[in-house]
Amino acid sequence: MLDNILASKLYRAGSVAYVSRSGGMSNELNNIISRTTDGVYEGVAIGGDRYPGSTFMDHVLRYQDTEGVKMIVVLGEVQFGHAGACANQASETAVAKNKALKESGVYVPRSFDELGDVIQSVYEDLVAKGEIVPAEEVPPPTVPMDYSWARASIHCTAILSACPIWIIYSVLCCQVGMSSGTELGLIRKPASFMTSICDERGQELIYAGMPITDVFKEDIGIGGVLGLLWFQRRVPKYASHFIEMCLMVTADHGPAVSGAHNTIVCARAGKDLISSLTSGLLTIGDRFGGALDAAARMFSKAFDSGLIPMEFVNKMKKEGKLIMGIGHRVKSFSNK
């Protein structure tokens, strides 16, 4: 990965910004742009979800207002399974989109193989016009060695004869605890996470001071683990058992939904049966218990408007609204 960062010149800003669907294609785009232009200014992958958190246009408009960006590259979805590659109608296909973009004045390659050539052609044209001043080449920063690799090299003396002097020095630093090597920036410190609750720095995970092997050996159970994570200490057996009983009671969403929960809370507060029942009923709304009412209103409105079911579904889809309902068999063969 570090070699790719250096080869793609990501250690300094270029003139080209890109936005793509797939994060997996970012490395390839960095490589292509670094070979055909003066490098990448910024790159963003919005993800392959059907409804991503940001869109191509969000970033394109942002790039247009960024002074250092002189050229924008957009890579659409390569159709290999992402939800964003789904085309439900002719206007959503890659062919239709490329045609519309080309008619709007966008430079569109005929295939991915030609992407690099098109980027280079446009870049060289902008340089010739004086709109882009190629970024100055600067020496890349020293890339620290991986801690694990350097540590393993201590036991591999045969490699020393072929190593540059700075690697030999860094390996010698390993033998004295690597403190000198890390201070000089020759060795990259290992990544580790530590909080007041858990510690992942060693060879074994530790929960609130208790090694994970002891967790299994003493069979403290789910309740005991939650006690370590939540309260940061060993809880008594009865407390562990109580936590597990709470999980058993709420494992099924039935007694844990808003109405049932409020009914239970009201009853535990000493209220009478009618008051407890009404507190649960008054919780019913659009996000709980009201799905059937909302579905009835939607279907009635569609029927009164003379829409057939397919038209109704397409209309709601275009408006980005969910169709209310209940009892969806989302994991059945007929997904209704």
Image (cartoon, rainbow, N blue to C red):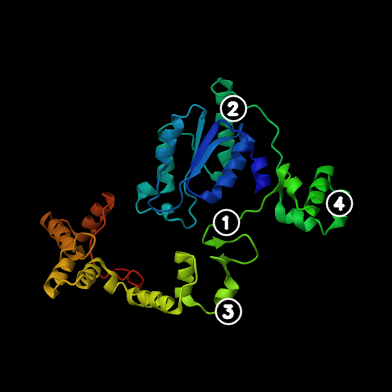
Q: Are marks 4 and 2 in contact (CB under 8 Å)?
A: no
Q: Can residue 213 be seen in this view?
A: yes
Q: Distance between the residues labelled 4 and 2?
A: 45 Å
User: Does label 3 or label 1 sit earlier along the sequence?
Assistant: 1
Q: How far apart are marks 1 and 2 (CA)?
A: 46 Å
Q: Is mark 4 on a helix, strand or loop?
A: helix
User: Does label 3 or label 2 sit earlier along the sequence?
Assistant: 2
Q: What residue type is labelled 1?
A: Phe
Q: How far apart are marks 3 and 1 (CA)?
A: 24 Å
Tag nearer the camera, 4 or 3: 3
Check disc 4 and report the residue beneath it: 160
Q: How crowded is mark 3: few (under 14 residues within 10 Å), some or many (20 or more)?
A: few
Position of 173 with respect to 64 (left or right) is right
Q: Can residue 102 be seen in this view?
A: no
Q: How far apart are marks 1 and 4 (CA)?
A: 32 Å
Q: Which amino acid does label 2 sit on?
A: Glu
The one of 223 and 117 positioned closer to us in this rendering: 223
Q: Quadrant of residue 55?
A: top left
Q: In which quarter of the image is residue 314?
A: bottom left
Q: Do the residues labelled 3 and 2 touch (CB within 8 Å)?
A: no
Check disc 3 and report the residue beneath it: 217
Counting from the top left corner in percent of width and height, residue 200 is at 59, 61
Q: What residue type is labelled 3?
A: Lys
Counting from the top left corner in percent of width and height, residue 155 is at 82, 59
Q: Distance between the residues labelled 4 and 3?
A: 44 Å
Check disc 1 and report the residue beneath it: 193
Q: What element carries label 3?
A: helix
The one of 15 and 148 positioned closer to us in this rendering: 148
Q: Is mark 2 on a helix, strand or loop?
A: helix
Q: What residue type is labelled 4?
A: Leu
Q: How crowded is mark 2: few (under 14 residues within 10 Å), some or many (20 or more)?
A: some
Image point (20%, 69%), residue name? 266
